[in-house]
Protein backbone atom coordinates (compact mmCIF):
# COMPACT_ATOMS: atom_id res chain seq x y z
CA UNK A 1 0.00 0.00 0.00
CA UNK A 2 1.50 3.37 -0.90
CA UNK A 3 0.51 6.58 0.86
CA UNK A 4 0.99 10.28 0.12
CA UNK A 5 1.05 11.79 3.63
CA UNK A 6 2.35 8.99 5.84
CA UNK A 7 5.13 6.41 5.84
CA UNK A 8 4.63 2.94 7.27
CA UNK A 9 7.06 0.24 8.31
CA UNK A 10 7.41 -2.64 10.72
CA UNK A 11 10.09 -3.51 13.26
CA UNK A 12 9.50 -7.09 14.31
CA UNK A 13 5.98 -7.17 15.75
CA UNK A 14 5.69 -3.36 15.91
CA UNK A 15 3.80 -1.44 13.21
CA UNK A 16 4.92 2.17 12.76
CA UNK A 17 3.01 5.00 11.08
CA UNK A 18 4.96 8.23 10.57
CA UNK A 19 3.33 11.48 9.46
CA UNK A 20 5.07 12.82 6.38
CA UNK A 21 4.08 16.48 5.89
CA UNK A 22 7.20 18.03 7.43
CA UNK A 23 6.84 21.43 5.71
CA UNK A 24 3.38 21.91 7.24
CA UNK A 25 4.55 20.57 10.64
CA UNK A 26 2.48 17.46 9.93
CA UNK A 27 -0.80 19.39 9.98
CA UNK A 28 -3.54 16.78 9.90
CA UNK A 29 -5.51 17.26 6.70
CA UNK A 30 -8.38 14.91 5.84
CA UNK A 31 -6.33 12.81 3.45
CA UNK A 32 -3.60 12.30 6.03
CA UNK A 33 -6.20 11.27 8.62
CA UNK A 34 -7.79 8.83 6.17
CA UNK A 35 -4.40 7.31 5.37
CA UNK A 36 -3.53 7.12 9.07
CA UNK A 37 -6.71 5.21 9.86
CA UNK A 38 -6.32 2.87 6.88
CA UNK A 39 -2.76 2.04 7.96
CA UNK A 40 -3.68 1.54 11.64
CA UNK A 41 -6.60 -0.71 10.74
CA UNK A 42 -4.37 -2.77 8.42
CA UNK A 43 -1.85 -3.27 11.25
CA UNK A 44 -4.69 -4.04 13.67
CA UNK A 45 -5.89 -6.83 11.37
CA UNK A 46 -2.40 -8.29 10.95
CA UNK A 47 -1.63 -11.15 13.39
CA UNK A 48 2.10 -10.55 12.99
CA UNK A 49 1.76 -7.12 14.63
CA UNK A 50 1.26 -6.76 18.38
CA UNK A 51 1.65 -3.04 19.06
CA UNK A 52 1.40 0.16 16.99
CA UNK A 53 3.31 3.44 17.03
CA UNK A 54 2.21 6.80 15.62
CA UNK A 55 4.98 9.34 15.24
CA UNK A 56 6.01 12.52 13.42
CA UNK A 57 9.50 13.97 13.24
CA UNK A 58 11.81 15.75 15.68
CA UNK A 59 10.28 19.20 15.08
CA UNK A 60 6.63 18.23 15.12
CA UNK A 61 4.45 15.30 16.01
CA UNK A 62 1.57 17.30 14.50
CA UNK A 63 0.75 21.02 14.82
CA UNK A 64 -2.99 20.37 14.68
CA UNK A 65 -5.72 20.00 12.12
CA UNK A 66 -4.90 21.73 8.84
CA UNK A 67 -6.02 25.32 9.46
CA UNK A 68 -5.90 26.14 5.74
CA UNK A 69 -8.28 23.27 4.99
CA UNK A 70 -10.59 24.26 7.86
CA UNK A 71 -10.65 28.05 7.47
CA UNK A 72 -13.72 28.24 5.20
CA UNK A 73 -15.69 25.43 6.81
CA UNK A 74 -19.33 25.85 7.81
CA UNK A 75 -21.17 23.84 10.45
CA UNK A 76 -22.71 21.78 7.65
CA UNK A 77 -19.42 21.01 5.88
CA UNK A 78 -17.99 20.07 9.28
CA UNK A 79 -20.96 17.77 9.93
CA UNK A 80 -20.54 16.18 6.50
CA UNK A 81 -16.78 15.84 6.88
CA UNK A 82 -15.47 12.34 7.62
CA UNK A 83 -12.95 13.83 10.06
CA UNK A 84 -14.67 13.11 13.37
CA UNK A 85 -15.23 9.57 12.09
CA UNK A 86 -11.46 9.13 11.88
CA UNK A 87 -11.09 9.88 15.59
CA UNK A 88 -13.93 7.41 16.29
CA UNK A 89 -12.16 4.76 14.18
CA UNK A 90 -9.01 5.33 16.22
CA UNK A 91 -10.89 4.43 19.41
CA UNK A 92 -11.87 1.10 17.85
CA UNK A 93 -8.29 -0.07 17.23
CA UNK A 94 -7.91 -3.06 19.52
CA UNK A 95 -4.12 -3.27 19.74
CA UNK A 96 -2.18 -0.85 21.94
CA UNK A 97 -1.02 2.37 20.28
CA UNK A 98 1.98 4.37 21.48
CA UNK A 99 2.40 7.98 20.35
CA UNK A 100 6.10 8.82 19.95
CA UNK A 101 6.04 12.60 20.29
CA UNK A 102 8.78 15.13 19.62
CA UNK A 103 8.30 18.87 19.12
CA UNK A 104 4.80 20.27 18.66
CA UNK A 105 1.75 18.20 19.57
CA UNK A 106 -0.90 20.90 19.28
CA UNK A 107 -4.66 21.05 18.78
CA UNK A 108 -5.76 17.94 16.90
CA UNK A 109 -2.17 16.66 17.19
CA UNK A 110 -2.37 16.78 20.98
CA UNK A 111 -5.85 15.23 20.86
CA UNK A 112 -4.52 12.44 18.66
CA UNK A 113 -1.59 11.77 21.01
CA UNK A 114 -3.97 11.72 23.99
CA UNK A 115 -6.24 9.29 22.11
CA UNK A 116 -3.36 6.83 21.96
CA UNK A 117 -2.83 4.43 24.85
CA UNK A 118 0.63 5.60 25.90
CA UNK A 119 2.98 8.43 25.03
CA UNK A 120 6.77 8.40 24.78
CA UNK A 121 7.99 12.00 24.51
CA UNK A 122 11.27 13.59 23.57
CA UNK A 123 12.57 16.33 25.85
CA UNK A 124 11.52 18.87 23.21
CA UNK A 125 7.85 17.82 23.14
CA UNK A 126 5.27 20.57 23.65
CA UNK A 127 1.63 19.70 24.25
CA UNK A 128 -1.06 22.31 23.81
CA UNK A 129 -4.61 23.17 22.77
CA UNK A 130 -4.10 26.61 21.18
CA UNK A 131 -7.44 26.62 19.29
CA UNK A 132 -8.47 29.63 21.40
CA UNK A 133 -5.98 31.71 19.34
CA UNK A 134 -8.04 30.84 16.24
CA UNK A 135 -11.34 31.82 17.84
CA UNK A 136 -12.47 28.24 18.45
CA UNK A 137 -12.10 25.50 21.07
CA UNK A 138 -10.80 21.91 20.85
CA UNK A 139 -13.23 19.73 18.87
CA UNK A 140 -11.70 16.27 18.95
CA UNK A 141 -11.68 15.60 22.69
CA UNK A 142 -9.12 18.10 23.99
CA UNK A 143 -11.27 19.71 26.69
CA UNK A 144 -12.23 16.26 28.00
CA UNK A 145 -9.03 14.23 27.74
CA UNK A 146 -6.79 17.09 28.89
CA UNK A 147 -9.00 17.64 31.94
CA UNK A 148 -8.94 13.93 32.83
CA UNK A 149 -5.16 14.01 32.51
CA UNK A 150 -4.11 17.23 34.23
CA UNK A 151 -7.17 18.31 36.22
CA UNK A 152 -9.53 21.25 35.83
CA UNK A 153 -7.29 24.16 36.85
CA UNK A 154 -4.46 23.46 34.43
CA UNK A 155 -6.81 22.29 31.65
CA UNK A 156 -8.47 25.71 31.87
CA UNK A 157 -5.09 27.43 31.38
CA UNK A 158 -4.24 25.16 28.46
CA UNK A 159 -7.56 25.58 26.64
CA UNK A 160 -8.43 29.17 27.64
CA UNK A 161 -4.98 30.70 27.59
CA UNK A 162 -3.05 28.60 25.07
CA UNK A 163 -0.51 27.42 27.66
CA UNK A 164 1.84 24.69 26.41
CA UNK A 165 2.95 21.80 28.61
CA UNK A 166 6.60 20.79 28.41
CA UNK A 167 7.50 17.11 28.23
CA UNK A 168 8.53 17.12 31.88
CA UNK A 169 5.29 18.78 32.99
CA UNK A 170 3.28 16.35 30.88
CA UNK A 171 5.04 13.47 32.60
CA UNK A 172 4.43 14.98 36.05
CA UNK A 173 0.70 15.05 35.30
CA UNK A 174 0.65 11.49 33.97
CA UNK A 175 -0.09 12.48 30.37
CA UNK A 176 3.19 10.96 29.23
CA UNK A 177 4.82 7.63 30.15
CA UNK A 178 8.48 8.37 29.43
CA UNK A 179 10.62 11.38 28.51
CA UNK A 180 13.92 10.75 26.76
CA UNK A 181 16.48 12.81 24.81
CA UNK A 182 15.37 13.80 21.31
CA UNK A 183 17.72 11.42 19.53
CA UNK A 184 16.27 8.46 21.45
CA UNK A 185 12.52 8.99 21.49
CA UNK A 186 11.60 6.77 18.55
CA UNK A 187 14.05 4.06 19.53
CA UNK A 188 12.63 4.11 23.06
CA UNK A 189 9.06 3.92 21.74
CA UNK A 190 9.97 0.95 19.54
CA UNK A 191 11.65 -0.83 22.45
CA UNK A 192 8.59 -0.20 24.66
CA UNK A 193 6.21 -1.34 21.89
CA UNK A 194 8.28 -4.49 21.24
CA UNK A 195 8.02 -5.47 24.92
CA UNK A 196 4.24 -5.13 24.79
CA UNK A 197 4.03 -6.89 21.42
CA UNK A 198 5.87 -9.89 22.90
CA UNK A 199 3.16 -10.45 25.54
CA UNK A 200 -0.02 -12.57 25.35
CA UNK A 201 -1.97 -10.82 22.55
CA UNK A 202 -5.54 -11.50 23.68
CA UNK A 203 -4.79 -10.46 27.28
CA UNK A 204 -3.13 -7.27 25.99
CA UNK A 205 -6.22 -6.35 23.96
CA UNK A 206 -8.58 -7.00 26.85
CA UNK A 207 -6.41 -5.08 29.32
CA UNK A 208 -6.52 -2.08 26.96
CA UNK A 209 -10.30 -2.44 26.64
CA UNK A 210 -10.77 -2.63 30.41
CA UNK A 211 -8.60 0.43 31.13
CA UNK A 212 -10.25 2.53 28.44
CA UNK A 213 -13.65 1.65 29.91
CA UNK A 214 -12.66 3.65 33.02
CA UNK A 215 -13.35 6.85 31.11
CA UNK A 216 -16.78 5.75 29.95
CA UNK A 217 -18.35 3.76 32.79
CA UNK A 218 -19.14 4.17 36.49
CA UNK A 219 -16.89 2.11 38.79
CA UNK A 220 -19.38 -0.74 39.45
CA UNK A 221 -19.97 -1.28 35.73
CA UNK A 222 -16.22 -1.08 35.06
CA UNK A 223 -15.49 -3.68 37.74
CA UNK A 224 -18.16 -6.03 36.32
CA UNK A 225 -16.78 -5.53 32.81
CA UNK A 226 -13.24 -6.28 33.99
CA UNK A 227 -14.40 -9.46 35.73
CA UNK A 228 -16.13 -10.74 32.57
CA UNK A 229 -12.99 -10.10 30.52
CA UNK A 230 -10.90 -11.84 33.20
CA UNK A 231 -13.16 -14.95 33.13
CA UNK A 232 -13.10 -14.93 29.34
CA UNK A 233 -9.31 -15.21 29.30
CA UNK A 234 -9.64 -18.64 30.94
CA UNK A 235 -10.95 -19.87 27.58
CA UNK A 236 -7.64 -19.04 25.88
CA UNK A 237 -4.71 -21.35 25.24
CA UNK A 238 -2.46 -18.52 26.34
CA UNK A 239 -3.88 -18.59 29.89
CA UNK A 240 -3.13 -22.34 30.14
CA UNK A 241 0.32 -21.75 28.63
CA UNK A 242 1.16 -18.77 30.85
CA UNK A 243 0.24 -20.52 34.07
CA UNK A 244 1.87 -23.84 33.05
CA UNK A 245 5.06 -21.96 32.11
CA UNK A 246 5.08 -20.26 35.52
CA UNK A 247 4.57 -23.53 37.41
CA UNK A 248 7.23 -25.35 35.36
CA UNK A 249 9.69 -22.46 35.53
CA UNK A 250 10.01 -21.97 31.77
CA UNK A 251 9.32 -19.01 29.46
CA UNK A 252 5.83 -19.01 27.88
CA UNK A 253 5.19 -19.24 24.14
CA UNK A 254 2.13 -17.19 23.24
CA UNK A 255 -0.26 -18.26 20.47
CA UNK A 256 -2.68 -15.34 20.53
CA UNK A 257 -5.60 -17.71 21.03
N1 LIG B 1 -2.37 23.88 9.81
C1 LIG B 1 -1.82 24.22 8.60
N2 LIG B 1 -0.55 24.61 8.46
C2 LIG B 1 0.22 24.68 9.55
C3 LIG B 1 -0.28 24.36 10.84
C4 LIG B 1 -1.65 23.93 10.95
N3 LIG B 1 -2.20 23.54 12.11
N4 LIG B 1 0.70 24.53 11.73
C5 LIG B 1 1.78 24.95 11.03
N5 LIG B 1 1.49 25.03 9.72
C6 LIG B 1 2.38 25.45 8.63
C7 LIG B 1 2.57 26.96 8.61
O1 LIG B 1 1.49 27.58 7.96
C8 LIG B 1 3.88 27.07 7.86
O2 LIG B 1 3.59 26.88 6.49
P1 LIG B 1 4.19 27.93 5.38
O3 LIG B 1 3.76 29.27 5.82
O4 LIG B 1 5.68 27.73 5.49
O5 LIG B 1 3.59 27.45 4.10
C9 LIG B 1 4.65 25.85 8.34
O6 LIG B 1 3.68 24.93 8.84
C10 LIG B 1 5.65 26.16 9.44
O7 LIG B 1 4.96 26.83 10.46
P2 LIG B 1 5.47 28.20 11.10
O8 LIG B 1 6.21 29.02 10.10
O9 LIG B 1 4.31 28.83 11.77
O10 LIG B 1 6.51 27.64 12.17
P3 LIG B 1 6.92 28.29 13.57
O11 LIG B 1 8.07 27.47 14.07
O12 LIG B 1 7.10 29.77 13.45
O13 LIG B 1 5.66 28.05 14.53
C11 LIG B 1 3.85 26.76 15.50
C12 LIG B 1 5.29 26.77 14.88
C13 LIG B 1 3.47 25.30 15.72
C14 LIG B 1 3.89 27.48 16.85
C15 LIG B 1 2.89 27.50 14.55
O14 LIG B 1 3.01 26.91 13.25
C16 LIG B 1 1.45 27.37 14.96
O15 LIG B 1 0.99 28.06 15.86
N6 LIG B 1 0.70 26.49 14.28
C17 LIG B 1 -0.74 26.36 14.51
C18 LIG B 1 -1.01 25.59 15.77
C19 LIG B 1 -2.49 25.48 16.04
O16 LIG B 1 -3.18 26.49 16.20
N7 LIG B 1 -3.00 24.27 16.09
C20 LIG B 1 -4.42 24.01 16.32
C21 LIG B 1 -5.15 23.97 14.98
S1 LIG B 1 -6.90 23.74 15.17
C22 LIG B 1 -12.09 18.06 14.80
C23 LIG B 1 -10.86 17.48 14.57
C24 LIG B 1 -9.71 18.19 14.83
C25 LIG B 1 -9.78 19.47 15.29
C26 LIG B 1 -10.98 20.04 15.54
C27 LIG B 1 -12.16 19.33 15.29
N8 LIG B 1 -13.26 17.36 14.52
C28 LIG B 1 -13.16 16.12 13.80
C29 LIG B 1 -14.54 17.85 14.94
C30 LIG B 1 -8.55 20.19 15.50
C31 LIG B 1 -8.40 21.51 15.39
C32 LIG B 1 -7.06 22.08 15.42
O17 LIG B 1 -6.09 21.39 15.58
Image (spheres, rainbow, N blue to C red):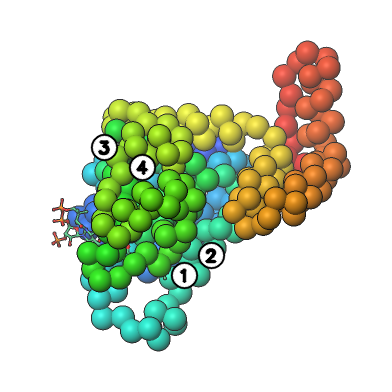
Of labels 4 and 3, earlier in sequence is 4
Q: Is mark 1 within 8 Å of ligand 1?
A: yes
Q: Is mark 2 within 8 Å of ligand 1?
A: no
Q: Nearer the viewer, residue 103 or 127?
A: 127
| Image location (x, y in percent) of residue 222 | 71, 51
- Numbered badge on residue 88: 2
- Numbered badge on residue 124: 3
Q: Can residue 40 be seen from the camera position used here?
A: yes
Q: Quadrant of ligand 1?
A: bottom left
Q: Secondary structure at mark 1?
A: helix
In whole angstroms, how far apart are the C-alphas of marks 1 and 4?
Answer: 22 Å
Q: Residue at x 26, y 37 (%)?
A: 124
Residue at numbered disc 4: 101
Q: Residues within 10 Å of mark 2 (few under 14, many from 20)?
A: few
Asked whether the beta carbons under mark 1 and mark 2 sit within 8 Å of each other, the answer is: yes
In whole angstroms, how far apart are the C-alphas of marks 3 and 2?
Answer: 29 Å
Residue at numbered disc 1: 84
| Image location (x, y in percent) of residue 63 | 28, 55
Q: Residue at x 84, y 23 (%)?
A: 244
Q: Residues within 10 Å of mark 3 (few under 14, many from 20)?
A: many
Q: Residue at x 62, y 31 (%)?
A: 198
| Image location (x, y in percent) of residue 98 | 48, 42
Of labels 3 and 2, earlier in sequence is 2
Horizontal side of 69 relative to 228 (left or right) equals left
Of labels 1 and 3, earlier in sequence is 1
Amino acid sequence: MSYEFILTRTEGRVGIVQFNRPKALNALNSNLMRELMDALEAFDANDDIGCLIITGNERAFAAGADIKEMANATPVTMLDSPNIGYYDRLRKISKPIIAAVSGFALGGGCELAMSCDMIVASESAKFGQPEINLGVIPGAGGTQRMTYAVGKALAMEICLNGRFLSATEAQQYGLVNRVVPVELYLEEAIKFAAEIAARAPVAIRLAKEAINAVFETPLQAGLAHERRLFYMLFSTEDQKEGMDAFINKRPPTWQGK
